[in-house]
Amino acid sequence: MTEENGIIKAVLNGDTESFRLLVERYEKPVTRMIGNLINDRHICEDIAQEVFLAAYRKLGSFDPARSSFSTWLFTIARNRSINAMKKRRAASVGRPPERMNSTGPADAIEQDELYARLDAALNALVPRHRRALVLAEFEDLSYEKIAQIEGVRVGTVKSRINRAKKKLRSALGSPDGVVL
Amino acid sequence: MKPQQVYDRWKRQKREIDVKPGFADEAMNRIHTWERERRSRVLSIERLVELVSLHPAVKTAFVAAGAMTGVVRLIIMVIVILSDGVANG
C-alpha cells in the first residue's frame, strides 16, 4: 500500500508521531487476532502493545518489496502470540457467546450451547491449525498472506484450514457436506 | 438452526472486539519512552547490537570483519611458528 509506505518513510525519517496512524489502523485487527489465538482477553491488549513497539523498533528492517506492512505486522503478532502461549496454557474459557437474533429463549440456549462447542473445538485445535483458521476466517486474509506469515506453502495453509474446519464441523455434529 | 448459520454467527461474534479507548495513546507513549531511552544510550553496546541487527549490510560487514580478523590472526600465527622454526633449526 503506497500510502502506508509513505507513512513508514516519514517515521523512518524521524516523524515518530506518524506511527500513530498505523497503530490506529491496525489496533483492532492485531488485538482481535491475538485474542482469538491465545484466548485471554486480559493479556491480549498488552501483547498487542508489545507488537506495536516491536514493529516500531524493527521498522528499518521492513521491506515493502517482500511483503505488505499488514503481513509483516501480523507475523510479529503471530510470533508474540506463540511466545505468550508457550509461557502459559490458555484457560479454555472464551468470551461468553453473544445472543444475536434469537427468536426465543429455547433458540438462545441452543445457540449458546453451539457457540460453546465451537469455542471448545477452537481451543482444542493444534496451534498451527488454529492460527491458519483464525487468520483466514476471522481476519479474512488470503491463503498467500497466511502462507507468508506462517512461512509455509499455500497448500499447507489450505490443508490446515480444512483440518481445522473438519474439527469444528464435528463439534457442531454437522456432516462433512456442510460448507463451513 | 442450520450448522452453517450457527458457524457464520459465531464467526461474526469472534470478529467483534472492543479495543479500549486510548490504546493508540498508550502505544505511542511506550514508543516515545523507548525513543528517549534509545537516544540517551547512543554509544551503548545495546545500541550497537541493535544497529547491527537491523541493517543487513552492517551485519554482513561485521561478519566479514570477524572472518578477516580470524584469517589474519591465523596467518600471523603460522608466520611466527615458521620463523621460530627457522631461527631454531
Image (cartoon, helix red, strand yellow):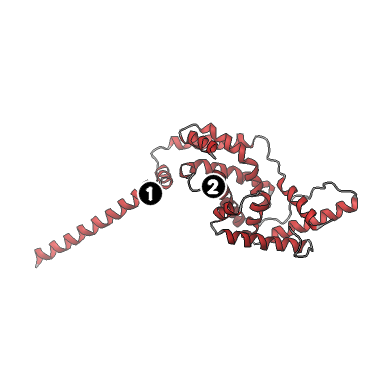
Please say whether residue A57 is visible from this viewpoint: yes
State if disc 2 and disc 1 touch (CB < 8 Å): no
Of marks 1 and 2, the one in the foreground: 2
Location of the C terminus of chain B (image quadrant): bottom left
Q: What kind of residue is marked 1?
A: Lys
Residue count near mark 1 (Cα–Cα under 10 Å), binned few <14, some 14–19, many ≥20: some
Marks 1 and 2 belong to one chain: no
Q: Position of residue A71 (x, y in %)?
A: 56, 48
Asked whether, in this view, residue A34 is left or right of residue A67, the answer is right
Residue at far bottom of view: B89
Dividing the picture into quadrants, the one containing residue B29 is top right
Chain ID at mark 2:
A
Q: Position of residue A73 (x, y in %)?
A: 56, 46
Asked whether, in this view, residue A133 is left or right of residue B51, the answer is right
Could you say whether the residue bearing mark 1 is in a helix, strand or loop?
helix
Q: Position of residue A100 (x, y in %)?
A: 82, 46
The residue carrying mark 2 is: A72
A11 versus B51 height, above or below = above
The residue carrying mark 1 is: B59
Judge by depth and name the residue closer to the eye, A126 or A161.
A161
Asked whether, in this view, residue A174 is left or right of residue B58, the answer is right
Location of the N terminus of chain B (image quadrant): bottom right
Q: Position of residue A14 (x, y in %)?
A: 47, 32
Judge by depth and name the residue closer to the eye, A177 or A66.
A177
Could you say whether the residue bearing mark 2 is in a helix, strand or loop?
helix
Chain ID at mark 1:
B
